[in-house]
Image: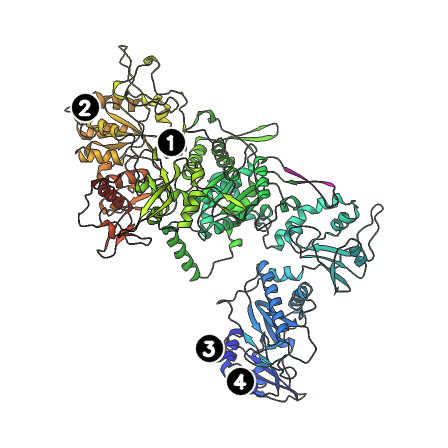
């Protein structure tokens, strides 16, 4: 199979091993024939014959023939057949294996094609292949016949009358669609024993002239593995053009159209007429049913006078009868509204069948039963996510946002959840949307490009349709429409315009449609962006490796089944059909607290996330009927799941509060890591490794195709810009120029990003202070600022009563602790220090160290999402700190003072009576009365999620990040669920439960570890360069990945170690 022997190569491609093939030679004197089962012998014999100019053409049989025919002329050729010498007939074919499509340019008979005619045939072949690909057909073999073009599709059909008619109808359909005055599709190739040009031989018609030369037929490189065209696709192609319809009954004063050509001309409808059956086919120049496309519309008048009109495009009915629509549009006759309404559902179903997407519930009752079982007894969300992960690697947060968006269609009191996905080009945005769209019932999904007003004119657009816009530039008019439909979610959106006749026209987009937008730079208009869940596609290096590994694995194996026909896909579609519209009540809504209410749409989105989770679990929630409307009540579990997703969208997988894209957030994180106060674009280039123009666009915004995209200077208040003069040069030559300098305000950024936290107030509504305390507060925290609007700042852990009853503060009565385990962490001194530590010992040092650093901003390599200021309140035993507050600087101070062992993280104190008693016992006991084991046991009994390992014993190098969604195993340090780091150390892995860490505890442990390290003086930072490839872990901390590398010394540092050492060197040099 080499290019040196194209004849043998084509034979091996077109035939299977040991297949018997007849070769037929057309000469000036007659016809020659032979039978071969040895391709090499056949190629050798044909090569000799092809050099003879008397040979007009050499052909072979395409389909499989009866092997017994080999005995007629076994591996030999008779050059002149007699009347008694038989050739292959249709009944000698055992099976049809090829659908041959021959595109031949129109020219005088008996001559070769000119170069221009030859090229026109290839253009027509490209059109046909593209059309069939749009119908879901696999890639064909492409070939040059010498005078025209060939397309060969692999099929598998028996040789019978039904197959003959099927192939004939397919070729006839392609002829009607694509044949014109330049090229034609040969309809005569439907017989089973049809002979076909043998590629590698010369086609000789007429004389070999300069204008019409003889050419060799050749087979072009095709797909590595040919895929069979499904029988259903062949039937759909063959039935595009209809049979003669039944004669319509005359209604009212309506007069039948007897001459369709005259009727089309009278309404200025251009057409191309072709014979069809016993009638005439009119291919219309412009589709009268839609302005979204031009081609595809046709009308047929049969010999009986019956008329059929339609369009091939799905948005126009997909080949259904639309003659009455066309006639009513131009003649104004409208007597068949009832019939059209009756056929509306059938049209939608026919479209789904035409596209090969028949709902499973009509053919497999088991699918419906399984979908109902999952909705009533299990959690449907993990099943949907697992189905999504079967076709798409990672991006489960994005998938969950799309699921919640779909579920919002069924919530009667929802304002609608729409999704905007941003990320770098080629990272999987389109694939994520396509994968989720495949899980949506076909009748309610709409994708692809469309004009600004196309949605108003799609007659079959259903309420609750999913509209996906993938990398589509939103025009100003489309953005205005998008604002309107997202605001008018529960009711149709009305658009009023005028027709070409200046008549008023009212168009509508149905209610409850959800929008999914995937773009590199976001939705464009900030008002549109603000109305959506803003999720980031995972573009990390780890995700790239996982995707590559999956791609290679898929390329090495055959698929188990077609993606559309998988059982889990069909089950998910059926689940969406079974969800009932319902009103969702949130009984605890008044107890939900937001850290910031500046953006009024974000609370709406959180409430809708709660409602959508409840609607997915509607068959497992409390249900009531009021005025015929189903009402369900959301539970605390719905709140927890909604907050988890909401927090993810405000962290590493989205910019819900800040509305930043992934790339903008990455740039801000780089600025924070380096501790920059002022920077220029070249400095940011060295830090990030990005192009200058890319950084400039991120900071200043840009215009693209008439759309304005705002930058960080407009979005983030912590960045400002000014100009200053810069002097550069050496050797006495200096150049002064002005440059832009960007200033960074860390405290302003911390205040800006603050606001993503959400909590649930305890039912008692206690603010954390005993009613008898009045306005008094403990002296130990009198110097700390108190924010009366912050539930943590308003909580006073030291408040005590002057009465003799000895009442102490009861943490179980404060919602700030019992209801918000994710908002507060408790740190306890570990070496037997009790209430006496307030007068002496490490307690004072701990307090001073933490107070000294409470306003400092620090970040860590593991959690570089955002830095936040610390609000710290302290009593004699515990120090209360916002969980989102980084403590690496404070802990570094404690480490230098030798006090590292006094900090042990503990989860929030629970509110049971036994917990209060045990905690009180610990607080009142002396150092000699209770051992350390007793104190740990009593404190563990006081905690709902007891910790097992102190933070000081955690080595970051013993833990690795898990892939996929966070685990529900609780953190070994703080006791929280949703952990992301797993221990690899053998002595810890042998415990009953796996040792896991949450993101924050791992970050704090890594920061403590890095803070203890002392850099060797031999390292030269000036020799280091930023790297973007995997070089292992940092050679100093052995925790984070190498970000800076010295190739001469073969030394690598992580971002944290490099920035710390750079700051130290700058301080030594007096550089601020």
**Label 3 to label 4: alpha-carbon separation:** 15 Å
Q: Earlier in the sequence, mark 1 or mark 4?
A: 4
Query: At which x and y percent is residue 173?
Result: 67, 64
Q: Quadrant of the C terminus?
A: top left
- From the viewer's perspective, tell me whether residue 55 is left or right of residue 647: right
Q: Earlier in the sequence, mark 3 or mark 4?
A: 3
Question: Do callouts 2 and 4 mark residues in contact (Cβ within 8 Å)?
Answer: no
Q: Earlier in the sequence, mark 3 or mark 1?
A: 3
Could you say whether the residue bearing mark 1 is in a helix, strand or loop?
helix
Could you say whether the residue bearing mark 2 is in a helix, strand or loop?
helix
Query: At which x and y percent is residue 924?
Result: 21, 20
Decide which of 196, 749 is in the foreground and name it. Answer: 749
* Residue receiving disc 4: 47
Above or below for 966 versus 750:
below
For the point 74% across and 49% down, the residue is 325
Residue 837's label in the rendered image is: 2
* Residue receiving disc 3: 2
**Label 3 to label 1: alpha-carbon separation:** 69 Å
Could you say whether the residue bearing mark 3 is in a helix, strand or loop?
loop
Query: At which x and y percent is residue 80?
Result: 63, 89
Q: Nearer the viewer, mark 1 or mark 4?
A: 1
* Residue receiving disc 1: 751
| Mark 3 burial class by Cα count in 10 Å: few <14, some 14-19, many 20+ | few
**Magenta run includes residue 495:** yes
Residue stretch in magenta: 493-507
């Amino acid at each position: 199979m080499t290019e040196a022997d194209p004849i043998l190569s084509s034979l091996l491609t077109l035939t299977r091993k040991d297949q018997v093939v007849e070769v037929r030679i057309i000469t000036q004197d007659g016809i020659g024939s032979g039978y071969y089962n040895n391709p090499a012998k056949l190629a050798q014999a044909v090569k000799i014959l092809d050099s003879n100019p008397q040979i007009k053409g050499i052909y072979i049989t395409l389909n499989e023939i009866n092997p017994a025919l080999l005995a007629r002329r076994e591996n030999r050729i008779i050059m002149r057949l007699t009347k008694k010498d038989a050739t292959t007939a249709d009944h000698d074919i055992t099976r049809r294996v090829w659908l041959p499509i021959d595109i031949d340019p129109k020219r005088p008979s008996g001559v070769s094609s000119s170069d221009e005619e030859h090229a026109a045939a290839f253009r027509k072949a490209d059109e046909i292949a593209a059309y069939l690909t749009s119908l879901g057909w696999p890639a064909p073999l492409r070939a040059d016949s010498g005078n025209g073009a060939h397309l060969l599709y692999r099929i598998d059909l028996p040789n019978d009358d039904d197959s003959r008619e099927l192939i004939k109808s397919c070729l006839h359909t392609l002829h009607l669609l694509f044949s014109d005055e330049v090229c034609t599709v040969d309809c005569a190739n439907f017989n089973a024993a049809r002979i076909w040009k043998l590629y590698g031989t010369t086609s000789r018609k007429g004389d070999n002239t300069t204008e019409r030369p003889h050419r060799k037929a050749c087979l072009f490189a095709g797909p590595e593995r040919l895929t069979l065209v499904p029988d259903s696709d062949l039937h759909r192609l063959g039935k595009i053009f209809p049979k003669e319809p039944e004669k319509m009954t005359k209604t009212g004063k309506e007069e039948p159209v007897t001459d369709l050509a005259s009727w089309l001309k009278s309404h200025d409808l251009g057409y191309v007429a072709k014979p069809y059956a016993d009638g005439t086919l009119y291919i219309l120049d412009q589709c009268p049913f839609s302005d979204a496309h031009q081609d595809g519309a046709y009308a047929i008048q049969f010999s009986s006078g019956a008329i059929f009109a339609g369009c091939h495009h799905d948005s126009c009915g997909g080949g259904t009868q639309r003659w009455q629509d066309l006639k009513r549009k131009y003649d104004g006759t409208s007597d068949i509204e009832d019939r059209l309404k009756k056929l509306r559902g059938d049209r939608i179903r026919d479209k789904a069948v035409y596209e090969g997407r028949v709902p499973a519930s009509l053919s497999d009752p088991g699918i419906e039963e399984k979908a109902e079982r999952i909705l009533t007894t299990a959690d449907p969300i993990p099943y949907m996510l697992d189905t999504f992960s079967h076709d798409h690697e990672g991006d489960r947060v994005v998938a969950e946002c799309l699921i919640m968006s779909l579920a919002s269609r069924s919530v009667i009191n929802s304002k609608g959840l729409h999704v905007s996905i941003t990320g770098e080009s080629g990272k999987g945005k389109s694939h994520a949307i396509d994968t989720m769209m495949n899980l949506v019932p076909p009748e309610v999904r709409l994708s692809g490009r469309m004009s600004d007003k196309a949605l108003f004119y799609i007659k079959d657009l259903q309420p609750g349709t999913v509209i996906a816009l993938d990398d589509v530039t939103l025009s100003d008019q489309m953005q205005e429409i998008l604002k309107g439909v997202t605001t008018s979610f529960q009711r149709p959106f009305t658009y009023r315009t005028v027709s070409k006749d200046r008549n008023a026209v009212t168009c509508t987009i149905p209610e409850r449609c959800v929008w999914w937008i995937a773009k590199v730079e976001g939705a464009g208009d900030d008002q549109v962006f603000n109305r959506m869940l803003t999720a980031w596609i995972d573009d990390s290096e780890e995700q790239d490796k996982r995707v590559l590994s999956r791609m290679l694995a898929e390329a090495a194996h055959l698929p188990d089944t077609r993606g559309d026909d998988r059982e889990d896909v069909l089950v998910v579609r059926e689940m969406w059909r079974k969800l009932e519209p319902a009103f969702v009540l949130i009984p605890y809504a008044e107890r939900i607290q937001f850290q910031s209410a500046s953006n009024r749409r974000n609370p709406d989105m959180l409430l809708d996330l709660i409602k959508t989770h409840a609607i997915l679990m509607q068959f497992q929630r409390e249900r009531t009927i009021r005025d015929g409307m189903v009402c369900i009540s959301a539970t605390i579990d719905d709140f927890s799941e909604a907050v988890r997703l909401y927090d993810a969208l405000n962290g590493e997988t989205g910019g819900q509060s800040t509305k930043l894209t992934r790339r903008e957030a990455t740039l801000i994180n780089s600025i924070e890591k380096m501790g920059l106060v002022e920077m220029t674009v070249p400095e940011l280039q060295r830090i990030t490794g990005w192009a200058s123009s890319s950084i400039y666009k991120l900071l200043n915004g840009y215009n693209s195709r008439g759309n304005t995209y705002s930058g960080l200077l407009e979005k983030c208040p912590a960045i400002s810009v000014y100009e200053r003069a810069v002097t550069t040069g050496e050797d006495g030559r200096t150049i002064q120029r002005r440059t832009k300098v960007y200033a960074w305000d860390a405290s302003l950024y911390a205040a800006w990003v603050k606001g993503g936290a959400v909590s649930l107030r305890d039912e008692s509504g206690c603010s954390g202070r005993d009613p008898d305390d009045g306005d008094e507060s403990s002296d130990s925290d009198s110097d700390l600022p108190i924010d009366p609007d912050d539930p943590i700042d308003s909580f006073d852990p030291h408040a005590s009563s002057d009465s003799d009853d000895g009442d102490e503060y009861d943490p179980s009565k404060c919602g700030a602790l019992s209801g918000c385990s994710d908002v507060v962490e408790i740190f306890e001194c570990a070496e037997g220090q009790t209430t006496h530590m307030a007068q002496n010992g490490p307690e004072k040092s701990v307090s001073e160290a933490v107070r000294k650093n409470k306003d400092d901003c620090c970040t860590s390599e593991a959690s570089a999402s955002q830095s936040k200021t610390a609000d710290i309140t302290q009593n004699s035993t515990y120090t209360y700190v916002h969980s989102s507050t980084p403590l690496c600087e404070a802990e570094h101070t404690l480490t230098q003072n030798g006090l590292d062992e006094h900090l042990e993280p503990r989860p929030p104190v629970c509110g049971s009576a036994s917990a209060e008693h045990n905690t009180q016992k610990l607080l009142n006991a002396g150092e000699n009365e209770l051992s350390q084991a007793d104190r740990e046991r009593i404190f563990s009994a006081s905690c709902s999620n007891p910790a097992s390992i102190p933070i000081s014993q955690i080595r970051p190098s013993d833990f690795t990040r898990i892939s996929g969604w966070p685990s529900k195993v609780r953190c070994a340090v703080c006791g929280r669920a949703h952990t992301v780091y797993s221990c690899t150390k053998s002595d810890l892995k042998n415990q009953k439960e796996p040792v896991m860490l949450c993101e924050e505890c791992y970050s704090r442990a890594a920061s403590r570890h890095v803070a203890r390290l002392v850099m060797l003086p031999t390292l030269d930072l000036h020799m280091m360069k930023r790297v973007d490839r995997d070089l292992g872990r940092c050679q100093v901390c052995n925790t984070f990945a190498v970000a800076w590398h010295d190739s001469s010394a073969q030394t690598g540092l992580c971002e944290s170690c490099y920035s710390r050492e750079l700051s130290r060197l700058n301080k030594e040099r007096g550089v601020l």
